[in-house]
Image (tube, coloured by chain):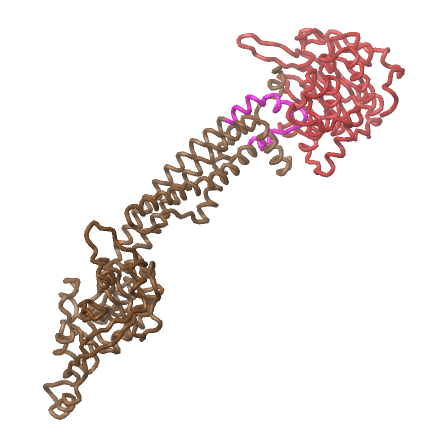
Chain colours: A red, B brown
């Protein structure tokens, strides 16, 4: 289970560094500069919110950091690994072990039960069958879904589905949690619930969080740092003192 | 991903859209089934022809005649080689020499004679032939009623079906239904026949004369002919076709060969051979030589020719027949494979559709760490699983189709008053081969969809909402 082992050593060091990072798409005749020359450094253990309007390039930046996409130019270096130089195979390994992702639309596989969904990354990691179920159960327990193992995603509420996808993101004990509008499809109450889990991971497991959101209030409430993007460019970067406090942890240690 | 996990995931994915995947699998099954059905019919027909030829005894038999017998089969032979008068006689000692040649199973003289048989005080004139004891295992006696001779010298006879009908006074008319062998055998089995024949006995007086005068009258050429009677028991009625090419079948009643020899029945050739018989042992008109396999016929034939005899066999006919069946099998196989090719297009279609449908799922799997190889393997495994199922179901289906055709053919044959035949045969290699073929074709069909799925851009795939 995520133990945050070694996180304390890394705390404060630069975990992610982008240099003049660009991602351009050509859409017909037009060239879309989704990410246009972003240089930023993210320190291990930070809770970063990427803010911006829709189309500002925040999701594209997240995908580049997640290793789902490759830059047109520039570099993304995560823990001394230049993602642009990794092979497709190595990039898949990076996604499997180093980062965990949650999405606005949960992205659970509808034909699988929660247990199977959470177990899936373990299959890709070639973990033995015997261990897989136990690990997946533990992870689901952590997000309070221990009783819904055999349910399919469609039988659950949005909040429960997002909790399941958090459990899946944690299963391979990644150092980074990348969240793309994790509360976008949830009402404010369940959104708060999810955010409390994410903060919990940040604080107790020492995970570095990068969260894409367009809600400034949400960012102000939870993030330790806010990066503002517009038209693919970095337009603002500020630390946020509000979240530095630990008064809002979710019901103690889990 | 581990292979087992991959297979497990593949099966569960296939179950998710059960209808489409079942239809695709059925497509493969039909392809495999037509392949199996066609090839099994081809093989069955080939075996049927093989059995028929075997039954005729033509292809493993060499017929040996003395060159002194000018009625040889092959004129060319008579013009080459030693002059008829200088060639060896075909008698017991030369028969033994022939029997000792390599690859010769047995060599036995052809003994046949016309004789009078009495059954229920009515005389019948017919052709009697001696039958070697080895003929017992010959499938020429398939469908025989009763039993084979109890020994090589037992006073027993086997009747040819039409002769049995004649004894019972049932003359087959053209067009009328032929009586079954069993029908004919029941009243005749165990009954006694009396055979009147002419025994050829060497005359002591003539021998004595030969001893004293020497030259003109060589020993053994003088004999007296004595009329004898012997009682024979009917033990069997066989279904041999009297018009078939097999030598013995031209006779209508058979007795053990040793018995026929021991009886010293006067044979038609005896008169002719009187002039050139070297000693007391009688000469044979014909010796039939059975060879281990049709492929050995040629060397055996050559060896016998070297001894100075005329030989006759049919070997080339099998070669052309085999060629015919090879071509037939090829064509049947091609048609079967075409069906499988259509089925493989079905697999490609299904898997490509699955990629479109499961874009998002593929995107998710990649986002959470699946490698290109994992995704490719998964689609590949799905194709393979469909191939395995399609292969097994297809073999079962093809087996059933072949069986149905076989049953249908036999119903037809029965209506036409022919005995049932196995025209369909599924060898184990066809079963295995068809399943392997189905899997290979499925995997090949899965190659393109699988690599397409593997190259899918996860960002694009996840953008779809």
In this rendering, the answer to whether B286 lies above or below A244 is below
Residue lying at the far bottom in this picture: please name it.
Answer: B212
As drawn, is A175 to the left or to the right of B236?
right
Q: Magenta stretch containing residue B375, yes or no?
A: yes
As drawn, is A10 to the left or to the right of B32?
right
* Residue at image coords 65%, 24%: A109
Q: Which residues are magenta?
A: B350-379
Can residue B85 be seen?
A: yes
Can residue B104 be seen?
A: no
* Residue in front for this viewpoint, A124 or A175: A124
Q: Main secondary structure of the magenta part?
A: helix
* Residue in front for this viewpoint, A23 or B399: B399
Q: Position of residue A252 (x, y in %)?
A: 88, 22
Residue B220, picture quadrant:
bottom left
Q: Quadrant of the N terminus of chain B?
A: top right
Q: Position of residue A207 (x, y in %)?
A: 79, 23
* Residue at image coords 62%, 35%: B8
Q: Position of residue B187 (x, y in %)?
A: 30, 63
As drawn, is A9 to the left or to the right of B150?
right
Q: Quadrant of the C terminus of chain B?
A: top right
Residue lying at the far left in this picture: please name it.
Answer: B216
* Residue in front for this viewpoint, B51 or A29: B51
Residue B244, picture quadrant:
bottom left
In this rendering, the answer to whether A58 lies above or below B114 is above
Count of numbered badges drawn on the protein: 0
Q: Position of residue B271 (x, y in %)?
A: 13, 76
Q: Magenta stretch containing residue B73, yes or no?
A: no
């Amino acid at each position: 289970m995520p133990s945050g082992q070694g996180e304390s050593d890394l705390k404060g060091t630069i975990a992610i560094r982008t240099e003049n990072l660009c991602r351009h798409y050509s859409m017909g005749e037009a060239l879309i500069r989704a990410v246009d020359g972003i240089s930023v450094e993210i320190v291990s253990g930070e809770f970063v919110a990427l803010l911006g309007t829709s189309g500002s390039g925040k999701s594209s930046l997240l995908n580049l950091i997640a290793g789902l996409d490759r830059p047109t130019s520039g570099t993304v270096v995560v823990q001394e690994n230049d993602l642009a130089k990794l092979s497709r195979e190595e990039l898949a390994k990076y996604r499997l072990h180093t980062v965990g992702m949650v999405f606005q639309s949960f992205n659970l596989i509808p034909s699988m039960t929660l247990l199977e969904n959470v177990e899936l990354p373990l299959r890709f990691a070639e973990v033995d069958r015997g261990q897989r179920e136990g690990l997946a159960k533990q992870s689901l327990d952590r997000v309070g879904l221990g009783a819904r193992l055999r349910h399919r995603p469609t039988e659950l509420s949005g909040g429960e589905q997002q909790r399941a996808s958090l459990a899946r993101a944690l299963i391979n004990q990644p150092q980074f949690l990348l969240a793309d509008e994790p509360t976008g499809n949830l009402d404010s109450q369940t959104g708060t619930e999810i955010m409390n889990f994410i903060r919990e991971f940040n604080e107790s497991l020492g995970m570095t969080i990068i969260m894409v959101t367009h809600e400034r209030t949400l960012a102000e409430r939870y993030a330790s740092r806010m990066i503002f993007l517009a038209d693919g460019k970095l337009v603002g970067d500020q630390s946020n003192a509000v979240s530095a406090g630990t008064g809002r942890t979710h019901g103690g240690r889990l | 991903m581990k292979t087992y996990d991959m297979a497990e995931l593949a099966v569960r994915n296939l179950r998710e859209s059960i209808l489409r995947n079942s239809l695709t699998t059925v497509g493969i099954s039909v392809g495999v089934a037509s392949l199996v059905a066609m090839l099994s019919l081809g093989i069955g027909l080939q075996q049927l022809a093989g059995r028929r030829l075997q039954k005729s005894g033509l292809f493993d038999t060499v017929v040996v005649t003395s060159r002194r017998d000018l009625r040889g089969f092959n004129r060319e032979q008579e013009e080459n080689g030693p002059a008829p008068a200088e060639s060896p006689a075909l008698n017991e000692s030369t028969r033994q020499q022939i029997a000792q040649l390599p690859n010769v199973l047995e060599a036995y003289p052809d003994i046949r004679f016309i004789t009078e048989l009495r059954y229920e005080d009515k005389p019948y004139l017919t052709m009697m032939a001696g039958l070697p004891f080895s003929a017992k295992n010959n499938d020429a006696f398939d469908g025989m009623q009763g039993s084979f001779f109890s020994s090589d010298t037992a006073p027993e006879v086997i009747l040819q079906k039409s002769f049995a009908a004649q004894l019972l006074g049932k003359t087959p008319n053209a067009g009328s239904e032929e009586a079954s062998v069993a029908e004919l055998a029941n009243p005749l089995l165990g009954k006694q026949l009396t055979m009147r024949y002419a025994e050829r006995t060497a005359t002591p007086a003539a021998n004595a004369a030969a001893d004293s005068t020497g030259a003109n009258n060589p020993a053994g050429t003088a004999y007296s002919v004595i009329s004898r009677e012997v009682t024979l028991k009917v033990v069997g009625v066989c279904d041999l076709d009297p018009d078939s090419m097999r030598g013995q079948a031209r006779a209508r009643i058979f007795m053990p060969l040793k018995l026929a020899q021991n009886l010293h029945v006067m044979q038609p050739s005896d008169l002719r051979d009187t002039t050139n018989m070297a000693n007391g042992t009688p000469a044979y008109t014909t010796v039939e030589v059975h060879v281990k396999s049709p492929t050995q016929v040629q060397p055996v034939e050559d060896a016998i020719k070297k001894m100075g005899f005329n030989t006759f066999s049919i070997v080339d006919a099998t070669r052309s027949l085999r060629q015919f069946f090879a071509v037939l099998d090829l064509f049947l196989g091609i048609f079967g494979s075409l069906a499988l090719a259509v089925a493989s297009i079905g697999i490609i279609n299904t898997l490509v559709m699955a990629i479109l449908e499961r874009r998002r799922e593929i995107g998710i799997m990649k986002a959470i760490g699946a490698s290109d190889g994992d995704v490719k393997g998964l689609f590949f495994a799905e194709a393979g699983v469909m191939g395995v199922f399609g292969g097994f179901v297809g073999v079962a289906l093809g087996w059933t189709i072949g069986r149905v055709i076989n049953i249908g053919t036999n119903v037809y044959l029965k209506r036409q008053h022919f005995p049932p035949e196995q025209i369909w045969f599924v060898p184990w290699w066809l079963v295995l081969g068809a399943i392997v073929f189905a899997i290979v074709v499925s995997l090949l069909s899965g190659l393109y969809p699988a690599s397409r799925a593997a190259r899918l851009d996860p960002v694009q795939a996840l953008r779809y909402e």
